[in-house]
Amino acid sequence: MKIKPEVFEFSSYQFNSRKRLTRFHYKIGFAGKKTLSFTETIILPQNLPLGKIPKGLLNNLLQNLHLILGISYYKLYCPPKIKLAKPISKEQAEFWNTIYKKGLGEFFYRNKINPKIRFPYQKRARTYSFELEQKNRCLVGIGGGKDSIVAAELLKKNGREITALVVETQKKSPIIDAVIKEIGVKKLAIRRMLDEKLFSEPAGAYSGHVPISAIYAFLGLFVAALYDYRHIAVGNEYSSNFGNVEYGGEIINHQWSKSSEFEKLFQDYTKKFITPSIVYFSALRPFYEIRVAEIFAKRCKKYFPYFSSCNWNFKITGKRPKSLWCGECPKCVFSFAVLSPFLSKSELLKIFRKNLFNEAGLLPVFRDLLGFGKLKPFDCVGTPEETRAALCLARKKIKKDLAIKTFFPKISAQSGSVSDGKNPKNLIQKVFRTQSSPTLPEEFKFLGIKNVLILGYGKEGRVTHEYLKKKYPHLKLGVADEKSCPGYLEKQKKYDLAIKTPGMPKKLVTIPYTTATNIFFSKLSAQGGSASGGKNPIIGVTGSKGKSTTASLIYTILKEAGIKTRLLGNIGNPMLEYLLKPHSQKETLVIELSSYQLEDIKFSPHIAVVTNLFPEHMNYHDGVKEYYEAKKNIINFQNKDDFFVYNPVCAKLANWAKTSAAKPISFIKNIPLKNSEIPLVGEHNKENIRAAITVAKILGISAGTIKTAIKKFRPLPHRLELVGEFRGIKFYDDAISTAPESTIAAIKSLPNIKTIFLGGEDRGYDFSRLEKTVKKYGIKNIVLFPNSGKRIFKSAESQRGLNIFKTSSMEEAVKFAYKNTPANAICLLSCASPSYSLWKNFEEKGEQFQHFVKKYT
């Protein structure tokens, strides 16, 4: 009689903290046949510290462990219906559908099964994620092979406190224990006791591959939460992203649960549904496996007598071989090949006991590994390109061996560009190049990196160079700057990683990169600061205009309150400069953040302040949507313990507040000072003051201190700055205004403006509202600078009644102002356009204006 499975049930689980074990129960129901029951037991190490773990988080961890461990039992019969012990949401169900479908892809392919996996969900299922304060240390999954060894060694070199995480299934592994002893770290070992019925081959059951790395990821998360670790690091390479065969419209990948796709899914899922305080990642994600082999061969020679990647040594059942390498499986053959360029023949033979390149029986395995067979072997091996590259690099020392004689002519013919007829240079460059790795946390970006290119060498670039030299002396550093290096972007291909300067569009960066902003935030995060609000709490300020004034106001109030504080960021104080000098972890940091700095930031400040929003920097951000998305990053990584301080007048900011993960707080309405006591001109500056006072109140600063600080505050240069009164004319420098909205605010702030300087770099702004404002306020004398000046008042109708002077000379513009501005009136420099068409920046423009105003008094 044919067995007909009907339902797979995640029936229950029990956690016993005293005995340090959890039992997970499953059932498979059949039509006309007795139900099969299974129990899997997870046993934890001693001294289980449960005091700080919220009960809800413990339940989340156990529920998700129940779901992932069930995959080993579900696959026996693949019932069409799934029944859960506890409800999950639709989004969670979609995650589990993907994990089971893609994680069992090879199993379905081998058994010719067309899966219909549908985890049930409840529309109103309540989900929670829990914040923890974890120690900044890493659990590192150790499996006995070169990859986990390299991951551990790189983390140790990075100064990380690491602990080896081991999952012992039925038997302990002497290989893993020997490796951990050489690493020189303590071990946390989980015992995983699978149900014995799995090994008795139940009637009609399927057998095959399960996504073991996904199982270990959830077990690692469980242990990290219980034993106080912030990171779980594994040794999965870029090579694991590549599949083996297409089946049922899907790419089947033996290593799917080691891939970037799984890692991203797992990171997002755990952050949203379990805890954002623990991050699982691969320390080797930027590298092909051949580059990992190079690191291992050069830095890890002490492990040669102990390590093994041969799967025969890690079988759950049956006898394990006495030798470390069977010398027959794809894993052994690939490991031999990929290490061959970096080891002498004698070293290879000492490890593997024989020359696998000369084994005729292994030629079919080599054929498959090189991509000349039917498909890539279903094993944890690298890509055909890196196997080919390995043989090319090792060719001189193995040119007489059978494998090279058999396959090198074909490799050479199929490798594309061949520089000298023998060495496929492009192929080799490809597999040694670092790859973009979005799942790699910023604080680990330099793991395994050989060289770094600083893209842009202004003030921040120079500070970044100094910082890297001091903190990462092993790195080879290069500099590429548009002003001093023609074709500077071409230098990128010679480097592993770039540090992109603010103001350089990321579309110009062709290699993996990070930024000085992310380096800074990651270092503070590693110390327990940043968004935590603990050490070095950060107040970040952005907005289309007013961010410098607001940040300076906040800084002034904090100083007046006796709070140790620093003012950093876009205001002219590079953040990494702060880390180069001794500093207190109790200092509060006020940081001005531009859209350039925010567009690729991976962190948010504890208190995020947004002054206002209107279109700016359109040529850089490729549109207003992209610009607003960059600005929004200031709140995108906040949590419930953080604050979002926003201007309620701006509809977009009010909408952000509705979905903010932080506590949204709108600017206070009333300023506790008389107008005569306020040292800043204009309604927009009153908004800046309201923002600063709101932050001060969050920090518990008294009203008296706030008043005193504001009274003492002096306007920043080039921001409605009174240059002076000369020949009866008041000259105001508002060079900072580089958008129409900002200039309109300036016009509304000053009485009796009769002359205004407009124009500059053309970013395609709409000047129609500005034109109406100029006429409404009776401004008669207009200076227009190129290039945008030609689009302002361009029609005859709009020019009626105006005295327009077009020039590219600031000196001539000032002369025009002196000649045409009546006494007791104002001449305003507020150009409504960026400065770069004629000046280096807005500061240079403002300084020229002030120079010529004073020269012609």
Image (cartoon, rainbow, N blue to C red):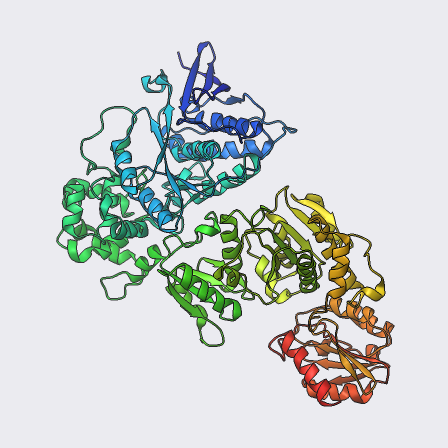
Residue 610 at x, y percent in the picture: 69, 56
The total of numbered circles placed on residues is: 0
Residue 234 at x, y percent in the picture: 39, 41
Q: Is residue 252 visible to us here?
A: no
Which quarter of the rendering shows the N terminus? Answer: top left
Q: Is residue 658 left or right of residue 394?
A: right
Q: Is residue 126 above or below residue 520?
A: above
* Closer-to-camera residue (41/228): 228
* Closer-to-camera residue (476/492): 476
Residue 448 at x, y percent in the picture: 36, 53
Residue 305 at x, y percent in the picture: 20, 41
Which quarter of the rendering shows the C terminus? Answer: bottom right
Q: Residue furthest front?
A: 562
Residue at left offset 23%, top offset 43%:
333
Q: Is residue 722 above or below residue 420?
A: below
* Closer-to-camera residue (744/92): 744
| Residue 469 sits in quarter | bottom left
| Residue 647 sits in quarter | bottom right
Residue at left offset 84%, top offset 66%:
676
* Closer-to-camera residue (695/371): 695
Residue at left offset 19%, top offset 56%:
395
Q: Is residue 220 above or below residue 302?
A: above
Q: Is residue 29 visible to us here?
A: yes
Q: Is residue 532 left or right of residue 512?
A: right
